[in-house]
Amino acid sequence: KMRMAPNPNGPLHIGHSRMAILNDEYAKKYGGTLILRFDDTDPKNENKIPMAEAYQWIEEDLKWLGVKFDKVEKASSRIEIYYKYAEKLLAAGHAYVCTCEQEKWSNLVRRGGGVCPCRPNTSTENVKKWKEMLLWKLKEGEAVGRVKTDLDEKNPAVKDWVAFRIVDDPQHPFVRKRIKVWPTLDFASAIDDYEFGITHVVRGKDLAVSELRQKFLYKYMDWKYPITKVYGKFVTSE
């Protein structure tokens, strides 16, 4: 069981076709199934904001390529499911709400090898702050939800990675603006891979770090991580 997860922020390009065909060919070769999952949970980054028209464009382009997908899912329609898992992780002490200013946090933890002062907060404190995030009592930039990693984690891009952030003015064609707390790609896709029963993931090299982050979440939930293969990027030369 496989999935491809384009961001519907515009039409597909040649790089997307490679991703789609690889997934499709493996699914066909082994008699598997393929899910088209729209990765549309970034309503702030101007380069990633979903376009209403792009969902249909992508489905049409995939059919033109001969890619057969068995099911279509939108990550943005599953926000409440992601909230449920976030609260489980917070209650179990595997995640925390961080109210540090981003640059100070990066200097202390990522560059300095220190420990976030919010990390020792109790589960009760974290769940309380989480509810304040959901009620928009905390605004954009005032808090994020982080998944705990090993304190000696050497990769700074993995260390206590952000799973949820607040977006004060989300731009999304299908989700009400009252939704202010949004999951990151790594959190949403990790939950969906488990819930959809994904067994194999083929992803680009630029997303290789996702596996390192997501395996902490899978360990906490006692889930088996999908078999993952990474392919490189096309390079052009003048």
Image: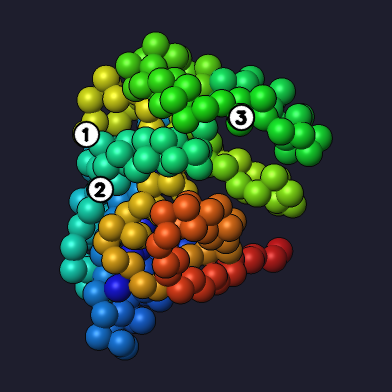
- Quarter-wise, where is residue 77 in the image? top left
Give the Cα separation between the discs numbered 1 and 2.
Answer: 10 Å
Q: Is mark 2 on a helix, strand or loop?
A: strand
Q: Name the residue under label 2.
A: 74
Q: Where is residue 93 in the image (x, y as percent from the top left)?
A: 49, 38
Which residue is identified by label 1? Answer: 174
3 or 1: tag closer to the N-terminus: 3
Q: Is residue 204 left or right of residue 16?
A: right
Image height check: is 103 above or below 202? above
| Circle 3 residue | 120
Q: What residue type is labelled 1?
A: Phe
Circle 1: element type? loop
Query: Camera-side residue: 63 or 45?
Result: 45
Q: Which amino acid does label 3 sit on?
A: Pro
* Image quadrant in which the N terminus is located: bottom left
> Could you tell me if residue 144 is visible in this image?
no
Residue sitting nearer the eye, 237 or 23: 23
Cα distance, mark 3 to mark 1?
37 Å
Q: Which residue is drawn at 65% across and 49% down?
A: 150
Q: Within 10 Å of the Cα at label 1, are there few (<14), some (14-19), or many (20+) other Cα atoms?
A: few
C-alpha gap between disc 3 and disc 2: 35 Å
